[in-house]
Image (tube, rainbow, N blue to C red):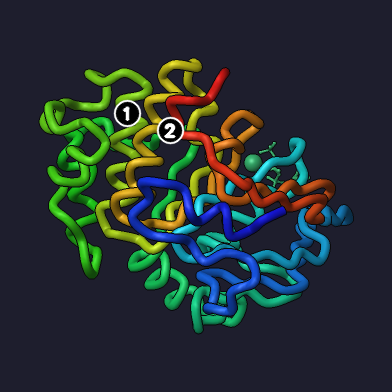
Amino acid sequence: MDAAAASTQAGEPYAPTVAGQDEQPLFRARGLSKIYRMGEVEVHALRGVDFEVRRGEFLVLLGPSGSGKSTLLNILGGLDTPTHGSVFYRDQELSKASEGELTQYRRAHVGFVFQFYNLIPSLTARENVELVTEIATNPMEAADALRLVDMGDRLDHFPAQLSGGEQQRVAIARAIAKQPAVLLCDEPTGALDVSTGGIVLRAIDRIHRELGTAVAVITHNAVIAEMAHRVVSLSDGQVASEVVNASRRGVEELEW
Ligand SMILES: Nc1ncnc2c1ncn2[C@@H]1O[C@H](COP(=O)(O)OP(=O)(O)OP(=O)(O)O)[C@@H](O)[C@H]1O
Ligand SMILES: [Mg+2]
């Protein structure tokens, strides 16, 4: 597989760091394991995962239910901590960070998008985004973030006045308004029909291209993997395969 081909797609304003180059990755995990203890029962959600995310990369994570995808994403995002192993964000070792340091880390560097949008019902789209921009270190204007996801004409709508796909785009605007280095998406289209899911993916793709944000997307839809620079599949808490796409498909080209 020609890894370099992944970074040379026409029209891309920047190149992600690809395999073989020694530039420091955005994330670097080694021997990552996570054991959840529920009384007498131990669940091994991750079993010795070595994993990297490179700057500006579009990464897709596949794998069956229970294979550890969300656990891995949550550890990268500082929402959970590993039982063994190390994970670094640039030079910061997340696996040694305190709760307070993880909070600071999330606030400055990570945008999350989940299957369910978790917008505050009593706040407008703009106000939902402002909840983040008010505490972020380097935010963009809430209205600008909403314009990036084509929601510039819905600034003063409440969540109940928006469709599911529109609410998800507000959630994406909220995630990227802090200008994070990485956008972590856990089944962002899981609750949406195919065409609405396509619109949401287009918004994520635009963020990736225009802001250079690294993106990691968990999905059950293998078609979405064709958009990625790299596809990592998990199985039973381990990395089962890793594929570098020689050429990526644009979101418009995906055949559902
Ligand atoms: N907070 C928790 N407490 C106990 N067990 C957990 C917890 N979170 C996850 N697990 C277990 O860890 C394993 C991996 O879960 P995880 O949520 O990472 O899977 P997943 O690949 O995201 O699955 P899905 O596709 O269904 O979302 C599962 O067996 C799950 O039951
Ligand atoms: Mg999951």
As shown in the figure, which amino acid type bears the numbered disc 1? Gln
Residue placed most toward the observer, 28 or 245: 245
Q: In this view, does 17 lie above or below 214?
A: below
Q: In which quarter of the image is residue 2?
A: bottom right
Q: Residue at x 74, y 40 (%)?
A: 63
Assign a secondary structure to mark 1: helix
Q: How crowded is mark 1: few (under 14 residues within 10 Å), some or many (20 or more)?
A: many
83 sits to left or right of 197: right
Spatial CA distance of label 1 from label 2 is 13 Å
Q: In which quarter of the image is residue 85?
A: bottom right
Quarter of the displayed picture in which ligand 2 can be seen: top right
| Viewer-nearest of discs 1 and 2 | 2
Assign a secondary structure to mark 2: helix
Q: How crowded is mark 2: few (under 14 residues within 10 Å), some or many (20 or more)?
A: many
155 sits to left or right of 41: left
Q: In this view, does 144 lie above or below 25?
A: above
Q: Mark 1 points at which residue?
A: 167
Q: In which quarter of the image is residue 110?
A: bottom left
Q: Residue 196, labelled with which disc?
A: none
Q: Mark 2 points at which residue?
A: 201
